[in-house]
Image (cartoon, helix red, strand yellow):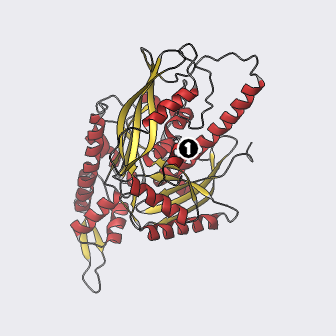
Amino acid sequence: MHNEQPIIVGLDIGTTKIAAIAGRKNEFGKLEILGFGRANSNGVQRGMVLNIDQTIKAIQTALENCYASNPNLEINEVYVGIAGHHIKSLQTRGDIVRKTTDDEIKQSEIDQLIADQYKTYIPAGDQIIDVIPQEFTVDNFPNISDPIGYSGVKVGANFHIITGDKNAIRNINRSVEKSGLRVRDLVLQPLASAAAVMCEQDLEAGVAIVDIGGGTTDLAVFYDGILKHTAVIPFGGENITNDIKTGLGVLKTQADQMKIQFGSALADEAKSNAYITIPGLRGMPAKEISVKNLANIIQARMSEILDFVSFHLKQVGLDSRMLNGGIVLTGGGSQLKHLIQLTEYITGLNARIGYPNENLAAGHIDELAKPMYSTCIGLILKGYNVFENTENRLHGSKQMEKHASDRLPQPAETVESDDFSGIRVPKRKSLKGFMDSIKDGLIDLFKEEGDAHL
């Protein structure tokens, strides 16, 4: 079993770092990390590739470091995260009237329903990244998680459609392809992070995943077992660093170091009589920086980011006590001291830090259990969802051939998905099945997009 599992590589093209992680599932379903490389990112701002040449160099450096950690690795294709303030989401509704109303609903009809959503009008210059079904209706029966096996005249669903700027998508694809790799799929970063830090109880209770990266803060809201909302907030850890640099008159590297070592997201928790001494530039006298002032700057920017989170939760009506799982903070920016207290104070919801180590096998590099690698590890998990779906489909089709003569249609609860797109929301809301359904995009439809090169 172990030897059959493929090695899957996640590539996180971030504003501050580019990380490449290669992993393979062991017999217990945990990820064994087989290679890890990272590099400083220069060509990316606010989650968008602006300088392709610099991004290619950074990707190649991350890959070289990954090969250095394991010379036996061979990396040809990668799962890549996408974020940036150009990402938008919208809700749509789709219905089809069935031709043969006496037969049970088949996967092909669901595929057609989803394919129709790719014709939704979106502004010129944008492209649909993913279409995620939320809940289905068959005739007058609402809230059906899996309509296959039901019969009726009309089948419909509510959809969450994620779109992005065509040029931004093209720049990511070009950067990866010119680095000698193939993009296996583009995954919205908050969905990848959610896969890495979320457990089944979170999904059931309702939770908001807040991934605070270098250039953006990504949000994914789950409620009642379905993805309710996604958003990309165009502020992150870099903005805090720049505020410290400007506000205290220090170098960017010094600002970053102070933020990590002495920073706090709550000014009330900072000692008013504590100071940091910064060496002066070229013979200038040393600078005394108040820890209280540092905390005031961090709290102001962090409050702004969390206000955006509250605004998005209000938009979807999940701001009060609806999310019993509260807020899960992840990403590099989540490691700020006292951030949990500030988050709870601003949003009124319980908060905790989400670490990606739940899915990692024992003996992994400690570095990788940090929240900043949630997206990258989530991308590997996404790759495994696609792989396992394909395996199940192939296995299912062989079984069907074997029993074609005497097999009766199964009830909806037990029908296996034989759909490579993994769009179905399974009847049993297991986390793996749910993640399959929300993240396995219609790869074939991507191939038809001329500029996506997928």
Q: Nearer the viewer, residue 218 or 80?
A: 80
Q: Nearer the viewer, residue 103 or 222?
A: 103
Residue 172 vertical placement versus 40 (above, below): above
Instruction: Kindly identify which residue carries mark 1.
Output: 444
Q: Nearer the viewer, residue 97 or 384?
A: 97
| Residue at far front of view | 99
Point out residue 342 in the picture as x, y percentages from the top left corner.
29, 46
Residue 224, quarter of the rendered image: top left
Few, some or many residues within 10 Å of mark 1 (<14, 14–19, 20+): few
Point out residue 164 in the picture as x, y percentages from the top left corner.
39, 49
Residue 231, quarter of the rendered image: top left
Residue 140 vertical placement versus 385 (above, below): above
* Disc 1 element: helix
| Residue at far bottom of view | 283
Residue 90 vertical placement versus 448 (above, below): above
Q: Is residue 178 visible?
A: yes
Q: Quadrant of the N terminus?
A: top right
- Relative side of 276 to 184, left or right: left
The residue sitting at 40% across, 52% down in the picture is 83
The residue sitting at 29% across, 72% down in the picture is 277
The residue sitting at 46% across, 70% down in the picture is 53
Q: Is residue 424 visible?
A: no
Q: Amino acid at mark 1?
A: Asp
Q: How many numbered callouts?
A: 1
Point out residue 194 in the picture as x, y percentages from the top left corner.
46, 42
The residue sitting at 57% across, 17% down in the picture is 104
- Relative side of 405 to 453, left or right: right
Point out residue 326 in the picture as x, y percentages from the top left corner.
37, 35
